[in-house]
Each structure stands twice: as structure tokens, then as C-alpha cells.
Amino acid sequence: MKRTLALVLAAALLALVPLCVLAESDPPLSTDGWGYIGYIYGGVALAVPPDYESYESDETFAAYGCVLLGGNADFMLQMRVFQEDDLTYDDFKEMIEQERTAEISTRMDGDSEILLYRNTKPSASSELYGIALTGLDGLFYKISIFTGADEAFGDDAPVWSIAEAIGQTVMHQDFSEWGVEGAPDFS
């Protein structure tokens, strides 16, 4: 009975809250087959490899603001959203700049800065690469990349090239023109 109730509740939540949209477009990468995913309510999009799979997120992940969760054998990606009272882009940038094990760079997407950081002391259980930005909704988004099921994080592990490609493609995207019901209009 509990299992049936949990399955019904999970199905209802998934039907009511379409968290992400898969876009069929050509990513600006030399790697064939990559496609874009995005979080329509924050206006954040990024490219992922062709074998990317979305993972089911449970209530614990949702309670921590997890809006995207997925990956493949080589990497796992988690995107979280933070309310203004919890953490802002500027606060996070200040914190990560103090971290001695973070190699940091920034790039611009229009008028918005995107922060990229790499863990210089990686382990199989640590965040290897991260991307931070303010979404079109004004909230702070943090994308964390971990090793996948292969648990490889050495210098030649595929997770690094995947993470760098994702970091290069993260962008702001107003999904309102797509006709997705309930999507905010950021124009």
C-alpha cells in the first residue's frame, strides 16, 4: 500500500511540475549528438552528451532545491536553485574565491556573468566541477558535476571534458516562446 501510494504521488508530481525541457538543436560543440536540456522556470539551459539520462529525484533532493539530476557512466550532474534568503550568486562567488582548491574563471552570457570552477583536489565523492549563475528569474543556480558510475576522476577521465563542454554551453534561455504551459515570460 505504501509503495503504491508513493508511486502515485511521484507520478502526480511529475505530471504537475514539468521541470525540464529537452531542446533539439545543434550545440556549439565539436562533439556530435549533444543536445540541450533546460529548466524552464529559471531560464537556464545547457548541453549534455547524447547518452545523458535524467534521474528520478526524490523528496530529499527536491527539499534541497534540486531541479535537474542526471548523467551517464562518466558523470553525474545536479542543478540546484537557491532562494535569495539562502544564497545569492555574489555570496557564492565570494565564498568560492576564498577556496584554495578551486580553479576559477568567468565568462559572460549577454549581460550576465557565469562562474566556472574546478576542484584541484578531486576525489571520487567530491564535486569535481561547478557552474554558478543567476537565472532569468533572479535566483541563484549552481550546477555541480561529479564522477559517474565509473568513479574515474584522474586527469584523463572523461568527466573533465564533459564538464568543460557543459560549462562552455550553459546559457540563459527564455522558454516562453516554446508554448510550454505555465512557463514564465522573461522577455
Image: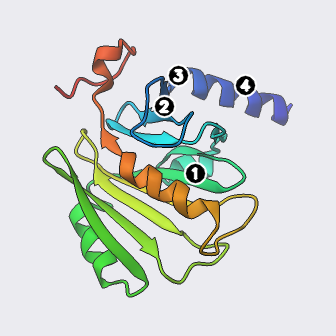
Residue denoted by label 1: 61
Task: Characterize the local packing of mark 2: few (<14), some (14-19) or many (20 or more) Cα atoms within 10 angstroms.
Answer: some
> Residue 118: x percent and y percent?
44, 71
Q: How much space separates mark 2 and mark 3, taking CA atoms?
A: 12 Å
Q: Tell me the mark number nearer the camera, choosing from 2 and 4.
A: 2
> Residue 183: x percent and y percent?
34, 22
Q: Amino acid at mark 2?
A: Cys
Q: Tell me the mark number nearer the camera, choosing from 1 and 2.
A: 2
The reply to whether discs 2 and 3 touch (Cβ–Cβ < 8 Å) is no
In the rendered view, tell whether residue 163 sits above or below residue 42: below
- Where residue 42 is drawn, which disc sits there? none
Residue denoted by label 4: 8
Say whether disc 1 or disc 2 marks the residue closer to the N-terminus. 2
Q: Residue at x 74, y 34 (%)?
A: 6
Does any portion of residue 134 appear in the rendered image? Answer: yes
Q: Amino acid at mark 3?
A: Leu
Q: Amino acid at mark 1?
A: Phe
In the rendered view, tell whether residue 110 sits above or below residue 90: above
Quadrant of image for the N terminus = top right
The reply to whether discs 2 and 4 touch (Cβ–Cβ < 8 Å) is no
Q: Tell me the mark number nearer the camera, choosing from 1 and 4.
A: 1
> Residue 134: x percent and y percent?
26, 50
Task: Characterize the local packing of mark 1: few (<14), some (14-19) or many (20 or more) Cα atoms within 10 angstroms.
Answer: some
Say whether disc 1 or disc 4 marks the residue closer to the N-terminus. 4
Does any portion of residue 146 appear in the rendered image? Answer: no
Residue denoted by label 3: 16
Q: How much space separates mark 1 and mark 4, taking CA atoms?
A: 18 Å
SS type, badge 1:
helix
Q: Would residue 127 be found to the left or right of residue 106 on screen?
A: right
